[in-house]
Every structure is written in C-alpha cells, then in structure tokens.
Amino acid sequence: MPEPLKSRNKNGAPFTRPPEIEACLARLESLDAAARLQAFAITSRKRDGYVPSEALTYFLRRAWAAGAQSEFKQIFELLMKRVGQSLFSTISDARMAGAQGIREEVMGRFAERIAKDCNGRFAMLDFFEVRFDLAFARFRKTVLRQIGPTSVLTVPLCTDSDEGQDISLEVETAAADFLGGDPKKIDDPAFRLELDAAIDALPDDQRRVVGLLRQGFQIDSKDPNIMTIAKILKCDERTVRNRRDRAYKTLGATLQEDA
C-alpha cells in the first residue's frame, strides 16, 4: 500500500493523491524494479503503459529511503529527462534569449529540491506526487522570477524562496578570508553584493558547487542516506573539491581587486 503524504493543506487536511494515482502506485508496487523502470522509460503520454510523473516521484523517494541507490539513480535520470523535455516546450530557444541557460538553471534547482527532500529537511516533493505538472509549473515560475531574464546563471547568496537560507558557514568563512580574514566584512551589504556578482561570473561548474555549498550540502559523506554535492553533480568528491578550490581562488582574486 502506498505510503501517505506528510504535508497538509491550508485547512490542515493531509495531502491526498488522486484515486487514479493511488491505483497506479498499487499496480506498480506489485512489479519488480526492472519492470517498473521499463515502464518509467516511456516518455510519450500517448503510448500504452505510460506512467505519470507523480508515480516516478513516489518511487524515486521510496528508492532513496530504501537505500536502493542504483534504482534511485535510474529513476532520477528518467524524471529529469521528462523535466528537460517539458522545459523545451515552455522555455524555447525561439521565444526567449538565453533559453538554454535558463533551462539548465531550472533543472539544477529542481535537482537541489530533490536533494533536500532526500535529506529529510523538507517534505518538498509531496505536492509533486499529487499534481506533478501543476507543481512543476509553479516551481518553474518561481525560479524565473528569482533569476530574472538577464541573470539566467545567478545563484544568489540569499533567495526569496520558502527556506530563506543564509550564506553557508563554508562560503562565509572563505569570503572573509578573501578580505584579510575579517569575518565582520561579510555583514557589509556592499561586500555581499560584490560577492554575489563574483559568484554569478564563475564558470557554470564552479558556480553550481558554490551554490550547493551555500545551501549547506556536504561535498561527500560516508553515509549513503545523505544527499551530497558529489551525488547531485554526478562526479567524485575530488572533482567537487577542485571546482570549489578554483572558485575560491577566482573569487579571492576578484574581490581583492575590488577592495
């Protein structure tokens, strides 16, 4: 029997999946993982056997909770493929300047949302199990409002998202080191703006690492139940550390020049 959702609506009632989704989950639970993955690979809604994205989200979370890393990875890639296809139709190269960068930013932030849900910090995917298309449309619009049309690669130090996160300790410590090791300078609004702009100018791979560090993610962990930067970016921890170190070196040089 599918597990109930934890989130509640504004009236305090728990989220419930539509009956057709519950029936789909019950049917898929009777199959083995290989058969489910074969069904999940069908991307056209018009084909027989198509599985709604609500169900992929459910089994993605269940695979992570069960420690089924291989299954999780395969479902993650299939779900992200669907997200990418959806973004191609809503953020097309023909209608929007810098569309590719915007699509990559939205997908990156959605991957971060999955990571937060896996780490148990928030029940951030519950609504995606109820109405995936609507949930993702709202998520996409939120990201577009945050990054703006002229800053598609921005990963701000502070966001206006639900979490309202601050600069992470690692980024804060590194930023203080850039200006002579004075931790008080991080509280200077002018310095924070300079740091934000400097992060925006980093190469994509380095900017994404700094963005994930900002949100408090670990680079690596021996605990398989912890979602890490290495897992999100699909690379080993040495690669992540090299990108971080190159980013900090560039930020240091840029901020010292500005100072």
Image (tube, rainbow, N blue to C red):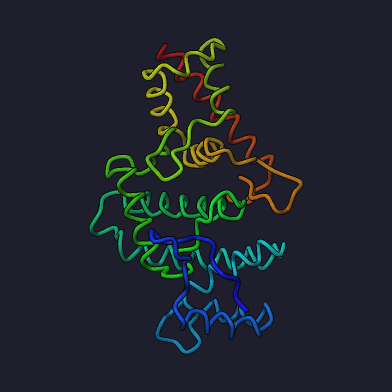
Q: Between residue 231 and residue 252, name the one nearer to us.
A: 231
Direction bottom: furthest residue: 48
In the image, residue 67 above or below residue 204: below
Tell me the quadrant of the picture where the C terminus can be found.
top left
Point out residue 116 in the picture as x, y percentages from the top left corner: 56, 50
What residue do we see at 29% from left, 58% from top? 93
- In the rendered view, does 248 fall on the left or right side of 34? left
* Count of numbered circles on the image: 0
> Looking at the rendering, which quadrant does residue 174 occupy?
top right
What residue do we see at 40% from left, 85% from top? 46
Point out residue 203 in the picture as x, y percentages from the top left corner: 47, 37
In the image, residue 91 above or below residue 233: below
- In the rendered view, does 13 fall on the left or right side of 64? left
What residue do we see at 60% from left, 29% from top? 245
Point out residue 37 in the picture as x, y percentages from the top left corner: 61, 76
Q: Between residue 77 and residue 119, name the one nearer to us.
A: 119
Q: Between residue 160 and residue 96, name the one nearer to us.
A: 160
